[in-house]
Amino acid sequence: MRTTVALLIGALAALAALAGCGTGEQGAVPDEAAQAAIVEILQAAQAQTQADRVAEIVWYTPETLHEYINGMAPRFVEAGFVILAHTEWRDREDEGPGYVELDLYDMGTAGGAAAVFDEPDAANSLPLPGGVKAYAGDAMIEFRTGRYYVKLTSRRDPEAQEPLLKELAEAVAEVLARETPDPTAGRQSP
């Protein structure tokens, strides 16, 4: 009996790890169409940069978002949050400890993205492709376009990661401006 229970617990833990949705209890199955759209965006952005993803994508759903942004999760969920892809990137030629976190949030609608991010004032604005106005702060860039909110943060060596931070922000903004995959295309309304 103990062996059966241990095997069952091990199998469930393996399934949770393979799903890659947060780190704690698993809620609803993530929206596969939204995941596929985000993967396309990230692949297209990567093709335009000298960056490589250095870890698997960690997915957060409305049920697991609190594990990542804790106190801000209710605000995002109330705004229509669908899914978050948390990724880490490094310049292909950089062997240092630094990297850039790229968080791509599908907020469901442009209104949802606007509810969690206001365009910055001119003093903190960084123009990106597609007419996107990003907020540029110390070691971070954040912006919204369409249904997506994007946040990039330099880690462990912010000064050395500055070019990669900007390159990734420009690539993602350009991809989103060019053609944002619509994960609801082809769905039937109830």
Image (cartoon, grey):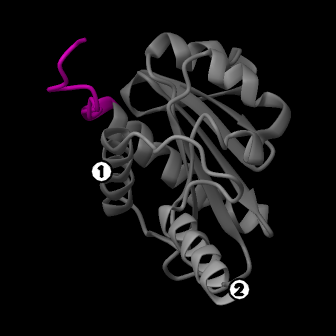
Q: Amino acid at mark 1?
A: Glu
158 on left or right of 116: right
**Residue at 80 percent of width and 69 percent of height:** 156
Q: Tell me where residue 169 appears, x and y as whole percent.
A: 52, 45
The answer to whether residue 117 shows anywhere in this view is: no
Left or right of 185: which side holds 47?
A: right
Identify the residue at image location x=65%, y=89%: 3
Q: Residue at 60% of width from left, 59% of height from top?
A: 163
Q: Which mark is residue 2?
A: 2
Left or right position of 113 against 182: right
The residue stretch that appears in magenta: 177-190
Determine crowd level at label 1: few under 14, some 14-19, many 20+ residues with C-alpha closer than 10 A: some
Please say whether residue 189 is one of the residues in the magenta stretch. yes
x 64%, y 54%: residue: 22
Q: Return the disc, 1 or 2, that comes first in the chain's sequence.
A: 2
The image quadrant of residue 113 is: top right
> Mark 2: which secondary structure?
helix
> Is residue 135 visible in this depiction of the protein?
yes
Most prominent secondary structure in the magenta stretch? loop
In front: label 1 or label 2: 2
Q: Does dot 1 land on a helix, a strand or a loop?
A: helix
Residue 35 pos. (x, y %): 38, 46
What mark, if any, has residue 40 been given in the picture?
Answer: 1
Q: Residue furthest right?
A: 71
